[in-house]
Image (spheres, coloured by chain):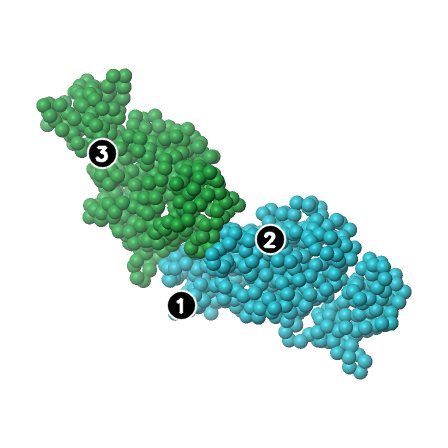
Chain colours: A cyan, B green
């Protein structure tokens, strides 16, 4: 292959028409160039591309994709013609010029998600985004056949975010070796940390793209402590090498989020200043400004750090969303609040009722909540570290629980509610929670309490339609009477009831 | 009636035999004397009795019971002959002498309850007492027909302690007038606070005695804020008058406990120093040394006060018993942790499952827990302040809930367990709780989690029998296998499971 030749590898919607490259807004323009294979192309060759439209100039890094191929990926946020020019220390990769036309986004393409109005999330096209996430830490490391089952499960529309590790995971129920390894070398520990394994990252990209086709955000976990290969204890220069590489490869995917860690505080080899450093790297180097979070084990990170876009929290107390919202002045996402399952660890032994309740309590306190599932099905049960169970939380596959349908039901309610709902103290003296738009719309949740009635004070100058929502049985029952002012609302006297109140 | 004549009114088991008065140990010897009716016998006449056996001399106050009758009550804690002599400022009540013989206690008479070995409670005869209390704040103010229903309910053996107000209660579902009033005068507020109404106190005594016959402790609430008659805002001299009177009348009943307040911190007219004063009065004046507690609304009292015998707590977090135990170094009684019911207040809308769970979590963390029930049955539901529902919590009557049978089941397990169980960290890393005797006996509770197995480390030098307890369905199922050391125990994968582990 002749070095220096420009190879267009166009992902997704690129089309050549009369010589013009058209790329849909927020989809990937990819420039592929042939370069050297000798030496260490990962380290020896520097490549970047400048993308220009009017006053917008965006400089993005390139990366080595193996076999002499170097790539630059760009996601345009504005329609119209974009010109580009490359820069490289390798002459034949330098000063390559070209252009493409960014075309309007199709109906289902809303662009990347970002923070909007302090507490909320929205797609780039302005549509609101309410995260209803799930967790399959190691699903990308299991190979195609299981991944296809996972994707089929995800296609049922329960979730719109996936928490997933970039590095493989080593833990109970994650004892198999991954499909690929991120570095060159041989397992378990004989790595060449100066070379990456493009196949590993290509596989992850395939999954990111598959998630995007299902409308699911890929919340990529950069570091985590569950390791038998040495990937949790890289030195700083290797960390930099890896971080730059994943930004160069992944940042042009519109559905990517950066999660610095799963359980940062369980990684004893790293200091707080290390985490601040990583956060800074992503904030500085990712020119597409994806969301940045950092997830805790037991000790919350200081989410007031202005480079962190949203508070990514592990805590089962999802009702505290209201408090954390004001503390951090950011969207609050309980990415982990224990999982539905039956394993002998407390973080994975919730009933479906409990997890569904944690979703409702989180959401009606102004937060967002994440799902996970950990069901043992083998008989007789084995010790966790001897077991090869395929659990959703660890590897994906099928869902066995009863919470996903209820989460989907809640999601449908939230997605049809007014924008910018916030916590409202509708239930004086009561531990029940409510979000809404004052005077217009209220969504209250009564926890696992079983009141046969509730007394609330609605505005006196309007009438309201009340609906009783059974969050477990997924029914919505309108109350015939209209309410105004001091109101006694009869309830079904069972747990997991919500009420929706809408001005007439 | 000739003044100065000695009238023996002998409660319970007193018998005259050959002129000898026999009184069973821990039962009441009552001396009744005729005195003046003119003036204000409550205030003008001072009367006390000294009871002497060998080196024991106990001075107890007398009280005016109306219609010219003055009484002194004494509970002997030692068998054998007791001599007495009265002292009075009224000549014909002074220097009255006599004696009685304290006979052995019958089988069902265990004497009063006191603290034993820091964290535990025991009857005076040494038998352990584990409080499983309930709450009928105003049951003594409702009259005989309802009280008979209440007593019939109590006879089913769910509970062995009753929290009850001395003063009538005014609140939602407690809107009727009481049977009697504590002071002379006319309702609602035209009281003669210098005279008490003996009929009021006689009625309460009747109930205390009925409770005793069912083996139930009467946890008498001295003050409370729920008032429309002015009894929550007495002046200090009236408070003293009332406190001395109830000590003189009630302290000889072996099943009496003194609870300074229901929700002391909701009584705005009283300062912390007032509560310390009341505590001191009971500690000083009650010569039978009944238990003294003070129950909070939202702010715990400082239960380290050495005159407080046990921490009487309102909190739904019964699992914190372990922590409060070490903080206060006393028995910890969650007298209120929300009630089973369906009212529109959160303190009374628990499912039976939730209340049962609060009992199990409290007990397996080394504490004790109290019950209450608040079910609305009227149809359609009325606003609370318009309703005349008879709820167990307010007036007694029948129980409608499903927790009492489960509480009785737990009680039977605890009453057949070894003495002096204490919290044991059997479940490493898990939020489950366990009490027991290290190496011998473990009672663990797995909350509303649904693990299909649990991994625990038992001592390696012995074998253990494991039983699976379904706390909701009230079944106890032995596991066939015997366990030792690192053990995986299979579980039914549903909430509300406990395990009992006994050394073989």
**Residue at image point 34% right, 29% down:** B282
Dividing the picture into quarters, in which one does residue A388 lie?
Answer: bottom right
**Residue at image point 17% right, 21% down:** B99
Q: Is residue A319 visible?
A: no
3D distance between C-alphas at marks 1 and 3: 59 Å
For the residue pair B313 and A251, the one nearer the viewer reads as A251
Kindly state the secondary structure of the residue where label 3 is placed: loop
Q: Earlier in the sequence, mark 2 or mark 1?
A: 2
**Residue at image point 36% right, 53% down:** B472
Badge 2 is on which residue?
Answer: A171
In the rendered view, would you say B324 is above or below A37? above
**Residue at image point 71% right, 65% down:** A202
3D distance between C-alphas at marks 3 and 2: 59 Å
Badge 1 is on which residue?
Answer: A479
In the rendered view, would you say A194 is above or below A466? above
Q: Is residue B343 left or right of residue A58?
A: left
Contact, mark 2 vs mark 1 (Cβ under 8 Å):
no
Badge 3 is on which residue?
Answer: B107
Q: Is residue A449 visible?
A: yes
Kindly state the secondary structure of the residue where label 1 is placed: strand
Kindly state the secondary structure of the residue where label 2 is placed: loop
């Amino acid at each position: 292959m002749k070095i220096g030749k420009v190879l267009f590898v166009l992902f997704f919607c690129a089309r050549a028409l009369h010589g013009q490259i058209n790329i849909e807004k927020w989809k990937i323009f990819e420039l592929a160039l042939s370069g050297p294979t000798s030496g260490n192309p990962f380290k020896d060759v520097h490549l970047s591309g400048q993308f220009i439209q009017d006053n917008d100039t965006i400089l993005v890094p390139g990366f080595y994709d193996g076999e002499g191929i170097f790539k630059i990926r760009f996601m345009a946020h504005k329609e119209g013609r974009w010109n580009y020019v490359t820069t490289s220390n390798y002459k034949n990769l330098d000063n390559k010029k070209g252009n493409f036309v960014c075309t309007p986004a199709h109906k289902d393409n809303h662009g990347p998600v970002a923070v909007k109005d302090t507490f909320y999330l929205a797609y780039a096209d302005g549509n609101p985004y309410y995260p209803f996430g799930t967790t399959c830490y190691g699903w990308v490391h299991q190979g195609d056949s299981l991944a296809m089952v996972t994707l089929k499960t995800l296609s049922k529309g329960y979730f719109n975010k996936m928490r997933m590790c970039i590095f493989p995971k080593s833990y109970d129920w994650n004892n198999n070796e991954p499909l690929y390894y991120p570095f060159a070398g041989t397992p378990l520990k004989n790595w060449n940390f100066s070379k990456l394994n493009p196949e590993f990252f290509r596989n992850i990209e395939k999954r990111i793209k598959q998630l995007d086709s299902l409308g699911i955000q890929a919340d990529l976990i950069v570091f985590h402590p569950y390791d038998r290969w040495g990937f949790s204890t890289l030195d700083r220069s290797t960390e930099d090498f890896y971080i730059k590489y994943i930004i160069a490869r992944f940042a042009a995917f519109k559905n990517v989020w950066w999660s610095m860690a799963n359980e940062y505080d369980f990684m004893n080899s790293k200091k707080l200043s290390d985490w601040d450093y990583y956060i800074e790297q992503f904030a500085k180097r990712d020119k597409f400004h994806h969301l940045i979070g950092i997830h805790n084990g037991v000790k919350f990170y200081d989410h007031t750090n202005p480079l962190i876009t949203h508070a990514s929290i592990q805590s089962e107390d999802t009702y505290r969303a209201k408090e954390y919202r004001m503390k951090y002045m950011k969207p609050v996402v309980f990415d982990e609040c224990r999982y539905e399952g039956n394993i002998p660890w407390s973080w994975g032994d919730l009933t479906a009722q409990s997890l569904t309740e944690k979703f409702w309590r989180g959401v009606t306190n102004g937060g967002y909540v994440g799902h996970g599932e950990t069901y043992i099905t083998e008989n007789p049960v084995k010790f966790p570290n001897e077991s090869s169970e395929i659990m959703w939380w660890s590897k994906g596959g099928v869902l066995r629980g009863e919470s996903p349908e209820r989460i989907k039901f809640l999601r449908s309610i939230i997605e049809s509610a007014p924008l910018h709902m916030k916590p409202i103290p509708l239930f004086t003296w009561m531990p029940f929670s409510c979000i809404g738009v004052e005077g217009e719309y209220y969504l209250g949740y009564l926890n696992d309490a079983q009141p046969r009635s509730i007394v609330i004070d609605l505005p006196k100058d309007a009438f309201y339609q009340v609906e009783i929502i059974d969050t477990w049985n997924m029914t919505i029952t309108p109350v015939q009477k209209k309410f105004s002012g001091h109101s006694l609302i009869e309830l079904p006297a069972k747990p997991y009831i919500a009420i929706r109140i809408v001005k007439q």
